[in-house]
Amino acid sequence: MSGKQALSALWRAARLPPDGLQRALLAGADPVVPSSFAVGAAAQAAIAAAALAAIQIGQHRGGPGQTVRVDMREAALECFCRFTVNGSAPELWDKLAGVYACRSGGESGGSGGAWVRVHTNFAHHRDGLLKLLGLPQGAQTTREQVALAVLSWDAFALEEAAAQQGVLVAACRTAAEWQAHPQRAALAECEVVDIEKIDDAPPLLLPALESTAAKASQPLCGLRVLELTRILAGPVAGRTLAAYGADVLLLNSPHLPNIDAIIDTSRGKLSAHADLRKASDRAAFDEVLAQAHVFMQGYRPGSLAALGYDAASVAKRRPGIVMVSLSAYGETGPWANPRGFDSLVQTACGFNHDEAAASNANTPRALPMQILDMASGFLMAFGAQAALLRQQREGGSWHVRVSLARTAQWLREFGRIADGFNAPDADFTGLVETSASGYGELTASRPSARLSLTPAVWTLPSMPPGSHGLRWPDR
């Protein structure tokens, strides 16, 4: 499956006007970076879908018709999420994170190899793993100590024990082992981008675009996006909508940690604090929600529902809203509740095993970038806009669902690249931009989607959480 074919399938599944596809100009072919998977085509299709939907919204609002060009190599490199602050690249992985050998691969015979991958980027996840392994908690415990402790475990037994304790561990499976897993079966009925009308409501009136002969407004100018996401996929979705002109208000809880990638993914956004356990913050949150067009959230299934902000409740508070939900493994099935990150989903779904086999590696090998996170982020942005367009035609409140594991299955549908590891290593020359930020001088990837009349741009600098108030900007 090519990037163009994948884009067409996404567009048709979202029931968008077929003539819109004529405005997408896609160039390039895999392999563009070393991998046996078509990561370039997946990146290109997801990025193009989001950009093309923005163009469609702009036209609906009276803006000009335009085209979007996406080069596959540039799209893939944008998905590496590389950045520096004041010339230095932050360390994005904890020293204990990564793959470890186990005693065996479980009752199935462990054809995926007796390996697990652990995720320890947050201190509480690290300490939970160390407690499970019977090791001293804290930053002093070494990787060698963890390796020795893990070696006494069966891979699948450790995965199961970790899940029961809320610890982040994935056993390295083959594609066949994942195919036989009940969670894979639960995902079989899901669309890559699942778009569902959940309640009745009249079409929301969108502000008209102000365009002159000399300058056209960005297609999402004046649209309000409330973002409650963390880590990577969700923040990328919000950043994407901001690049096309949306007002994106990112809300972080003051008691939850973040990773350094927030420096890159907060470009173009307002960044506020809100603790929804407090009545005062809930009241302010309800005020901004009442004016939002899109509500994006990336918390574990059920987390916001416990606070009264599940999709049905949000639709009652703001009729006509488009809610976008991200999960690791989907919202149904035996793995609907466990936490998950790109690296773990890659491992559980067989990608690490397949990449190692294709490159003759002796240990599990990750995909060259966190493509499940990145593609899911762009697909969330696409789904939000597709649902907005349908809301304009049909009315109603809408719920869009994307999961890392379903994105993983989508990536497999592109097929394998026989000579994928012959591709050159990533070269970012000419593909980055430098801007001021609340963290220092930020150098990071520029958008790979090239809109012909309204180039994607972030008008607000990346700022630390809590830099802005919990309110929309005045216009």
Image (tube, rainbow, N blue to C red):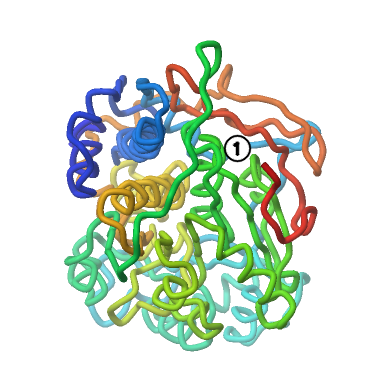
Mark 1, other Cα within 10 Å: few <14 / some 14–19 / many ≥20: some
Question: Residue 392 placed where, x, y %?
Answer: 33, 49
* Amino acid type indicated by mark 1: Arg
Image height check: is 268 above or below 407?
A: above
Question: Residue 212 placed where, x, y %?
Answer: 52, 17
Question: Residue 168 placed where, x, y %?
Answer: 51, 73
The C terminus appears in which quarter of the rendering? top right
Residue furthest toward the top? Answer: 214
Left or right: 446 with respect to 320? right
Q: Residue at x 34, y 41 (%)?
A: 359
Image height check: is 134 above or below 292?
A: below
Q: Residue at x 64, y 80 (%)?
A: 130
- Please name whichever residue, 146 or 176, is drawn nearer the observer in this view of the structure: 176
Which residue has dot 1 on it? 82
- Badge count: 1
Corner quadrant of residue 44: top left
- Please name whichever residue, 345 or 193, is drawn nearer the observer in this view of the structure: 193
Q: Residue at x 57, y 63 (%)?
A: 228
Corner quadrant of residue 274: bottom right
Left or right: 96 with respect to 426? right
- Please name whichever residue, 18 or 112, is drawn nearer the observer in this view of the structure: 18
The answer to whether residue 88 is seen in the rendering is yes
The N terminus appears in which quarter of the rendering? top left
Left or right: 372 with respect to 273? left
Image height check: is 179 above or below 412?
A: below
Question: Residue 114 placed where, x, y %?
Answer: 37, 69
The answer to whether residue 35 is seen in the rendering is no
| SS category of the residue bearing label 1 | loop
- Please name whichever residue, 137 or 320, is drawn nearer the observer in this view of the structure: 320
Image height check: is 366 above or below 94?
A: above
